[in-house]
Image (cartoon, grey):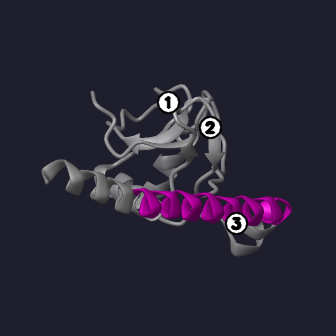
Amino acid sequence: METSYNFNIHNIGGIGWHEYTLPGYPASHSCLRLLRKDAQWLYSYADTWILAPGGATTKARGTAVMVFGDYNWGGRKPWRKLLNDPNANNISVEELTKLLEPDVPKMLKEQSNRERVADSIKTAKAMAAPVQERSGDSLSN
């Protein structure tokens, strides 16, 4: 099956999220499988990585992602708890803040780097466009 709306969280490690069937048990090496509407929303929301030409190295990372929780192998499937309590798997703002706080400076640094890289790519494309137009005009004369 094709993995639509694929978003790499860790490019080299092959970790990402994407639309795929949800079989009701762990069936992936490390990807987060999502329903189509959830995969579409996340894909449109997040910034992807910017790779160097050839794709072997990363020029800038995209939206920071933290995957929270763990799977208790042999235990009750965590999503089954939701049948009795829709809030069973929620995390408090305090708990989330405590988890994220140590990484916020690095996330902000990466975000600034991504903006710089994206701006430099846009500038380079804008500067190349008039050159291409001029060379195209001379060919048609």
Q: Which residues are magenta?
A: 100-128
How far across and down, in percent of the image, does residue 77 sit? 52, 40
Residue 121: image tag: none
Disc 1 marks a residue whose amino acid type is Pro
Instruction: Indicate which disc, 3 or 1, sits on the residue closer to the N terminus.
Output: 1
Count neighbours of disc 1 (C-alpha within 10 A) and say few if under 14, some if 14 to 19, many if 20 or more: some
For label 2, the SS is: loop
Instruction: Indicate which disc, 2 or 3, sits on the residue closer to the N terminus.
Output: 2
Count neighbours of disc 3 (C-alpha within 10 A) and say few if under 14, some if 14 to 19, many if 20 or more: few
Q: Are marks 3 and 1 in contact (CB under 8 Å)?
A: no
Count neighbours of disc 2 (C-alpha within 10 A) and say few if under 14, some if 14 to 19, many if 20 or more: few
The residue located at (32%, 36%) in the rendering is 21
Distance from the alpha carbon under mark 2 to that under mark 3: 34 Å
For label 3, the SS is: helix
- Please state which of the two labelled residues, at mark 3 or mark 1, is closer to the viewer: 3
What residue sits right under mark 3 in the picture? 112
Q: Is residue 54 magenta?
A: no
Disc 3 marks a residue whose amino acid type is Ser
The residue located at (19%, 48%) in the rendering is 139
What residue sits right under mark 1 in the picture? 26
28 or 47, which is in the foreground? Answer: 47
What residue sits right under mark 2 in the picture? 71
Query: Would you place residue 138 above or below residue 52 in this image?
Result: below
